[in-house]
């Protein structure tokens, strides 16, 4: 059942190239993007003036990536809110608000209650889910399914990549419907997205380096994660995975926030993962993150750097460089998280923990 892997989590991590390919499959009909189920009039989508993404846990980190993509492509103000906070703070929701509910199981009660609240206020809801026929897509106006197959391990991996991919598809679908991008721009983005499964496989094929690192680090008591732009949610997700399955204190930060507080935590030997954006994207973003690596290293941190192939600017300040193939800045979220998933999975395995059934957690939490 585990296909020769130590855990379902390891198996699911290694299925991610095909998972993303499955999320992408069959979306283009005559060059035009389609969702699975859509009961929202295009004129309603054209009038949307705000998007609120509601989700919990890993799905909320996928939502943070969505925010960068949707605002960039569609110019619609987008917020991400933890589903359990949304309803209780009397949020501003109108008929022009589009709520995007992300949930692997489609049964998370906190997310379901947020969906119900949004619809009571007249908002339209699009569900991004993995489990067909589950409650959240049934109670939504439209659904986009991940098609990544069942996820058994409590800690989400392939569903996370599927969720991010589905969010990109939604962003491009909205841009298509609203005319924010030209058809040839959408085609170029889809072409690059379709190349991602191949890049994922390259990252997976190199997993030995990170596995060894995790085994060597199995006794660490705290790990920090830094990133900017979509590297920020990646840092949050890397920290969440380590807490969930290895029970290690871990925190993810926006790298720009470092000097406003977290840098005080850095002392001799503190492991810090840094997710470096592409040097070919916005250049200032890349050089700022490289400076952050320098800053934490100068204070004694052990720097574990995830950087694009050929990015040599990181070399003088990195204790370990983990390479990912080059892609667009936005799409790197589908690659840079993989070494972090492998790190947590391998470290928890090396500690002899139950990777698939971590203490105190459930795959789907159906109570508020
Ligand atoms: C938590 C799970 O309880 O729910 C997490 O332990 C998951 O792994 C979160 O990310 C959200 O679940 P879902 O099914 O709504 O995506």
Image (cartoon, rainbow, N blue to C red):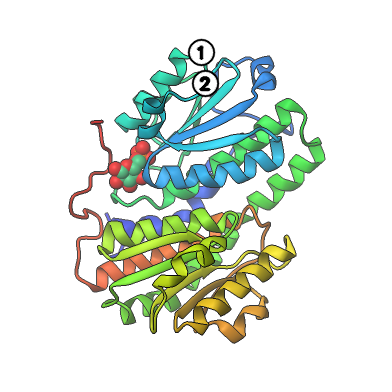
Q: Position of residue 66 (x, y in %)?
A: 56, 42
- CA gap between label 2 and label 1 equals 8 Å
Identify the element where label 1 is drawn: loop
Element at label 2: loop
Where is mark 1, residue-wise?
122
Residue at 40% in and 42% down: 149
Of label 2 and label 1, which has the lower sequence position?
2
Q: Classify 362 as above or below 311.
A: above
66 is higher (above) or lower (below) than 17: above
Q: Is residue 286 left or right of residue 153?
A: right
Let me know if residue 262 appears in the view.
yes
Q: Position of residue 146 (x, y in %)?
A: 48, 39
CB atoms of marks 2 and 1 within 8 Å = yes
Going by the picture, which residue comes out furthest to the bottom? 316
- For ligand 1, tell me if the residue under mark 2 lies within 8 Å: no
Q: What crowding class fits label 2: few (fewer than 14 Cα within 10 Å), some (14-19), or many (20 or more)?
A: many
For label 1, the crowd category at 10 Å Cα-Cα, with few meaning under 14, some 14 to 19 and many 20 or more, is some
Which residue is under mark 2? 93
Q: Nearer the viewer, residue 46 or 223?
A: 223
Give the image quadrant in which the ligand numbered 1 is located.
top left
Residue at 33% across / 31% down in the picture?
A: 110
């Amino acid at each position: 059942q585990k296909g020769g892997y130590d855990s379902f989590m390891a198996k699911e991590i290694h299925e991610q190239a095909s998972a993303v390919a499955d999320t992408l499959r069959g979306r283009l009909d005559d060059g035009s993007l389609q969702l699975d189920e859509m009961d929202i009039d295009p004129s309603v989508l054209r009038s949307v003036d705000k998007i609120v993404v509601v989700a919990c846990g890993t799905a909320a980190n996928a939502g943070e990536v969505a925010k960068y993509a949707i605002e960039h492509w569609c110019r619609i103000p987008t917020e991400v809110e933890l589903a359990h906070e949304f309803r209780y703070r009397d949020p501003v929701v109108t008929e022009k608000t589009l709520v995007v509910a992300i949930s692997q199981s489609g049964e998370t009660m906190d997310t379901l209650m947020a969906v119900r609240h949004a619809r009571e206020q007249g908002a339209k809801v699009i569900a991004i889910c993995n489990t067909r026929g589950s409650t959240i897509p049934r109670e939504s106006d439209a659904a986009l399914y991940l098609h990544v197959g069942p996820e058994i391990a409590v800690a989400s991996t392939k569903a996370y990549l599927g969720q991010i991919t589905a969010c990109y598809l939604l962003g491009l679908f909205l841009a298509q419907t609203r005319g924010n991008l030209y058809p040839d721009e959408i085609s170029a983005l889809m072409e690059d997205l379709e190349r991602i499964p191949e890049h994922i496989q390259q990252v997976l094929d190199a997993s030995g380096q990170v596995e060894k690192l995790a085994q060597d680090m199995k006794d660490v008591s705290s790990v920090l994660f830094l990133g900017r732009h979509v590297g920020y949610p990646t840092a949050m997700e890397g920290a969440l995975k380590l807490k969930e399955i290895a029970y290690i204190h871990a925190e993810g930060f926006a790298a720009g926030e470092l000097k406003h507080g977290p840098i005080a935590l850095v002392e001799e030997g503190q492991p810090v993962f840094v997710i470096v954006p592409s040097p070919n994207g916005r250049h200032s973003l890349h050089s700022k993150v490289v400076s952050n690596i320098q800053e934490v290293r100068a204070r004694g941190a052990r720097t574990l750097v995830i950087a694009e192939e050929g990015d040599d600017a990181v070399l003088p300040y990195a204790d370990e460089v983990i390479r990912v193939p080059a892609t667009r800045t936005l799409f790197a979220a589908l690659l840079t998280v993989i070494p972090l998933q492998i790190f947590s999975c391998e470290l928890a395995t090396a500690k002899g923990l139950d990777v698939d059934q971590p203490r105190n957690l459930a795959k789907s939490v159906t109570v508020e």
